[in-house]
Amino acid sequence: MASDQPTEHLIDLLYGELTEEEESSLREDIAQSAEMQAELAELEDLFQQVSDTVEVREVPQSLHDSIMAAARESVTSTVEEQARAVRRPPAVAAGGDSRGFWGRMKGGQASQIALVAAVLLAGAFVFRFVSMSDPAAPMAKYESEAMPSLLERKEADEAPGVAMPKMEPPAAAEEEIFEGESAARELAADERVLEKVAEKPAAAQPSAKDSPRPEVIARPSKKSVPKKKAKPRTSSKSAKGSAIADIWTEEQKQEAPAPAPSIDGNAASTDSLTVGAAEDKSNRAGKAKEEFRPAEGSLDAVQESYNRSDFRQTIAQADKVMASGASATDKARALELKAQSYSRLGMLTQADATYRNLQNNYPTYNTGSVRAAREELSRKLNERREPKKRAPRQKKSYDFEAESSPSSLE
Amino acid sequence: MLLAIAKSVLGIKSDDAVPYTDQSDEDLMIAFGEGDADAFEVLFKRHERGIYNFVLRSVGRADLAEELTQDVFMRIIKSAPKYTTSAKFTTWAYTIARNICIDRARKKGGKHELSLDKNVSGDEGEGRTFLDNVADESNTGASSYDRKQFRERLAKALDDLPEDQREVFIMRHVTGLKFREISEVLDIPLPTVKSRMRYALEALRGHLAMYKGQSFDEDDREANVPTG
């Protein structure tokens, strides 16, 4: 290839691809070599002939115009794209999918329908769960009603010269109220009564004589009975608990001839209940109580009837509630009161049927207390039946003497 | 960039801008990618003839050459926003043109051929060939006959050349690419390009030995000199 180097340099020279220095150097070499001069002359001759023969054609004007039009159109679209990129988010400008979440869903319309259905189902489930299974929801209504009066009651408790029985800590009292469902509802009803009773500090301490419904509070649940060491009341809720405890304590005093035991077993504190309880104030509280008349066919009416131990009225009111468009929670509560009324009336079979109805229609409502009530009912029913079974069959004796006596003939 | 776009849209040109004619191909391409259509016009005028003739001699048909040339420049236009100066524009553009020609030849089932002896119209049989494109078509007489003979021999000599040599010859002699650019387009070393060119010229010289020392331009001039 070394011998080819001069020829390649001559070609470079022929096509003008040498620098000035390279060209001058090569021309000096050519001047010294006759062979290279002849070679260069031949190549120049050939180059000239080919260059003269081969024509370089011009681009057609139509082709030129069409390409330039395409270029200008491309520039326009590029400018628009860049302007859009300034306005739009980077992901979209970079060629990302510009559709929204709804449009980008895979599966098209089926996925959209499925998503809507799932959301609706979840919403319905949450609504049902909240409205049916939350035991605190019905209480909140009563609590809100009772709260203002209890606040006033608290102020009355703090007034000098008024001694109140000590209660357990507020948090513990509140927890117990919410845990015992049936007891809590009774307490809520009592609080509503207290709302009217506790208009004044002195009226918050009714005497045994003026106790509005002692029979209602005659059976406080175990959880509603304070058992722990008493602490000073510092909140409205503790005032609420103390008010209920007051009524229950007075009821105990009514039932028992002996002084009722105090909440913490302190007889001195029990005695203090009657201190400062003026009779006229108690009468005013009784009047306030009488003014409280709930609407017919409402749960309040059912509760009111039940609190007044008017169990037949309670059953009637409960039926009205069931027939009305009341909420499921109210209906369930009405059924429960109806069942309790049957139980109070001694109609255990009807009570059991009502409880069964309650369980079937409202399976999530107070399951524990309803179950316990049914067990209690079935126990009572068994007790009622067992003596009949166990009783030995005796021959019916005929009292001939009585038949023959003149008085009987008469 | 936004400023450049705004200027382009409004037709405002900055005073300190370098004239398009003094800018490199790469700078013009970048300017076009940013939305400057005038830059592309300058760039297009620089290379349209070379690329068109390269394609024309590759496919041998004027109509097809126009179509493929348009494809080449459309590809360049579309790639403008992503163009970087990592590659020389000339190399890049001729690589595109060459690939398009090769693809076209493959689709037709034939081989990629570069010829100067095909009809410009693309029709078979008699017709005007690339070698008929002479500088002055008004020539008559013996000069015209000799020229025609020379063209035929040149065309035959080129057809007889190996394809790699013919390709280098056309790129250098027809489109005017430098040897270095040819080596980049063909992706072969520079000495190889020069070797192929040398072999091509030697082969042509052997085929055209009878026309040694004859200049058609001089003959034409003598023939066109008015007598009396």
Image (spheres, rainbow, N blue to C red):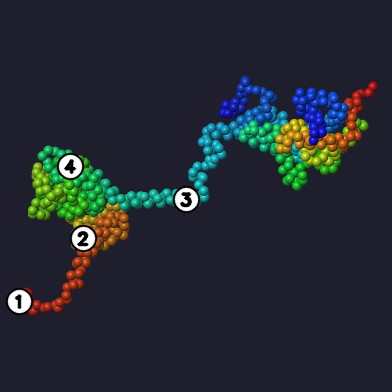
Q: Residue at x 85, y 41 (%)?
A: B126
Evaluate whether residue B6 shows in this view: no
Q: In this view, does A74 lie above or below A346?
A: above
Q: Residue A142 carries which label?
A: none
Query: How far apart are the alpha carbons under marks 4 and 1?
Result: 75 Å
Subunit of mark 3? Answer: A
Screen quadrant of the N terminus of chain B: top right
- The image shows residue A341, relative to residue A187, as above or below, that is below
Element under disc 2 = helix
Q: Spatial distance from mark 4 to mark 2, Cα to Cα? A: 39 Å
Q: Which type of secondary structure does the marked residue at label 3 adopt?
A: helix
- Left or right: where B125 falls relative to A131: right
Q: Which residue sits furthest top?
A: B15
Q: Name the residue under label 3.
A: A113
In depth, the one of A180 and B215 nearer the eye is: B215
Q: x and y percent of residue A191 in the render?
A: 20, 47
Outermost front residue? A2
The answer to whether tags 1 and 3 share a subunit is yes
CA distance for labels 2 and 1: 44 Å
Q: Distance between the residues labelled 1 and 3?
A: 91 Å
Considering only order in the chain, which callout, 1 or 2, is on the residue closer to the N terminus?
2
Question: Residue, x 25% and y 56% (percent of image)?
Answer: A369
Chain to which the residue tagged by mark 2 belongs: A
Q: Quadrant of the C terminus of chain B?
A: top right
Q: Name the residue under label 4.
A: A232
* Amino acid carrying mark 4 in the image: Pro
Q: Name the residue under label 2.
A: A343
Chain bearing tag 4 is A
